Image: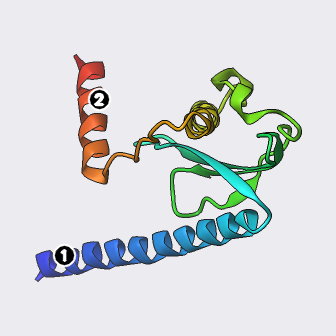
Amino acid sequence: MDVLKLGLVIIAAFMIQAVLSLMQTKHFNNEFIKLRKQGKVAIGRKSGGFHAGAIVMFLIDDHGNIRKGKKLEGVSFLARVRPLDGYEGRYIGDLKEEDGPRNHRNLRKAIADAALTYRKFVNGEEIDAPPAPLTRIGRSAKGLLRKAV
């Protein structure tokens, strides 16, 4: 009987996580749509695995200059889209990882990814799709095993 209760608790936890993740995704999509209605948007991402992941969105003008920035950063469904200030007027193609906040490694990488994605788009290159969830899990596991050895 205790195993059945434990199983039900685990199933309920997964269902709650799924619903809350869907709510976060809807929030992100709404924020993206708001920016997209104002013009072109460049997005950069860096999955976090066991660390805080990050997604950045930059509203850009026709010349690639940033008009507004937003970020989604965190390890759970509680993360929300927030302003990313300090990049207004800068050319997105020139952004580098060092241009991000020092103590936010994945946010820095997401900013660099947005710049790279923009440069690829401008040059007509193919933009890589993000890896599938199982691929990311496998890569994270390999990284953890390498650190352990």
How far from the left and from the top, in percent, is residue 21?
Answer: 47, 69
Which numbered circle lies on residue 144?
2
Q: Amino acid at mark 1?
A: Gly
State left or right for residue 57 relative to residue 23: right
| In the rendered image, the vertical position of residue 133 relative to residue 11, given as above or below | above
Q: Nearer the viewer, mark 1 or mark 2?
A: 2
Q: Earlier in the sequence, mark 1 or mark 2?
A: 1
Q: Please tell me which residue is depicted at 28% across the width and 35% down the height of the picture.
A: 139
Locate residue 79: give its quadrant.
bottom right
How far from the left and from the top, in percent, is residue 149?
Answer: 22, 16
How far from the left and from the top, in percent, is residue 129?
Answer: 40, 47
Q: Please tell me which residue is depicted at 69% across the width and 66% down the height of the picture.
A: 31
Q: Please tell me which residue is depicted at 67% across the width and 69% down the height of the picture.
A: 33
Q: Secondary structure at mark 1?
A: helix
Q: Secondary structure at mark 2?
A: helix
How far from the left and from the top, in percent, is residue 68?
Answer: 82, 50
Check the picture and name the quadrant holding the N terminus: bottom left
Q: Nearer the viewer, residue 14 or 73?
A: 73
Name the residue that disc number 1 marks: 7
Q: Badge 2: how crowded within 10 Å, few (<14), some, or many (20+)?
A: few
State left or right for residue 137 relative to residue 113: left
State left or right for residue 91 relative to residue 98: right
Given the current orientation, which residue lies at the most extreme right position?
89
Locate residue 144: give its quadrant.
top left
Instruction: Specify the color scheme.
Output: rainbow
Q: Amino acid at mark 2?
A: Leu
| In the rendered image, the vertical position of residue 89 relative to residue 13, given as above or below | above
The alpha-carbon separation of the residues under discs 1 and 2 comes to 28 Å
| In the rendered image, the vertical position of residue 18 relative to residue 135, given as above or below | below
Which numbered circle lies on residue 40?
none
